[in-house]
Image (cartoon, rainbow, N blue to C red):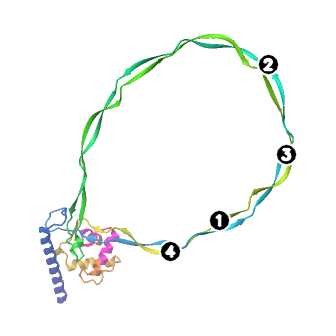
Amino acid sequence: MRVYQKQNLLLAFMLMLFITVNVTAQQNDIPFGDLPPTNEYGKCYAKCKIPDVYETVSLQKVVKEASTKLEKVPAVYETATETVQIKEASTRYKTIPATFKTVTEQIMVEPERRKLRTIPAKYTTESKQVLVSPARGQWVRKKKSPGCFSQNPNDCYVACYEEVPAVYRTERTRVMVEGPKTVEDVIPAKYKTITKKVIDQPARVEEIPVEAKFRTVSKRVLVTPETTREITIPAEYKTVKERRLIKQGGYTVWTEILCAERTTSSKILSVQRSLSEKGYNPGPIDGVMGIKTQTALKQFQTDKGLPVGNLNLETLKALGVSS
């Protein structure tokens, strides 16, 4: 029992020393452009890098390409009736005399006249946007996560490319929308009405057709000639498995975590017991944040939609462990 207590005390001392060194280094060089949301003593925050998430999907691969083959289609016949002329059509003629009618007619007594007039130009004021300075981008360095599980410090750095919008000014100009022009006005002609007798229908010879005579006969006719048709043979497929990226990894936002002095063996023991009760395997219940405990904790955070990569207060609340 005394050996176990000494191990726990040594572990807590080393963890506090590691976090203290990291905090001191960060005060001199903050690699991120933003800071944690509060400046309260006794509170710690973290940003952590999370890996990409993949899934295995089933895909259909072609085993044998689709093909075609030709099949013979015989000719089709049917019995049809045909009308045969037995007497040609002819024409007889009839003479029709002319007819007359009384009409009125317009006679021009004064011709059409044209008069010119000038219309001045029309103007409008237009506004346009003139670019003063174009849009540009700049890189902003983000802060390292003190609670990151990764041993590689480069996993806890991030840089964001942010946009600086363009600047414009408004200029106004007077623009001619319609130039000066000359319009021609038409003064219509004047007319006088007179009455006279004219031919309505001239004399003519009318042709009266005499219809031809026909008889119906039956015969065998080709409906569709002999042909070939193309039959499509569908392709054959097999199902294969493929690994596909479904969620891009990256860095988390600032998340409140337990500070080093509060990350005790008893606290880790409570986390391990809660993970085990909820169906996750944290490995030995020994109060040590080992690989199995980290793996189980990450899986629990992912399943519950919690911040991933550190022992944060949201995760402790979800596990039912006091912070």
Secondary element at image label 3 = strand
Q: Amino acid at mark 4?
A: Thr
Tell me how far mark 4 sits from mark 2, CA to CA.
Answer: 93 Å
Asked if the residue at tag 2 contacts the one at tag 4, i.e. Cβ–Cβ closer than 8 Å, the answer is no
Asked if the residue at tag 1 contacts the one at tag 2, i.e. Cβ–Cβ closer than 8 Å, the answer is no
Check if residue 300 falls in the magenta segment.
yes
Residue 117 on image: x %, y %: 39, 19
Tell me how far mark 1 sits from mark 4, CA to CA.
Answer: 29 Å
- For marks 3 and 4, the one nearer the N-term is 3
The residue at which mark 3 appears reads as 84
Q: Which quadrant of the structure image shows residue 180?
A: top left
Check if residue 297 falls in the magenta segment.
yes
Asked if the residue at tag 4 contacts the one at tag 1, i.e. Cβ–Cβ closer than 8 Å, the answer is no
Magenta region = 295-317
- For marks 1 and 4, the one nearer the N-term is 1
Q: Amino acid at mark 2?
A: Pro
Asked if the residue at tag 3 contacts the one at tag 1, i.e. Cβ–Cβ closer than 8 Å, the answer is no
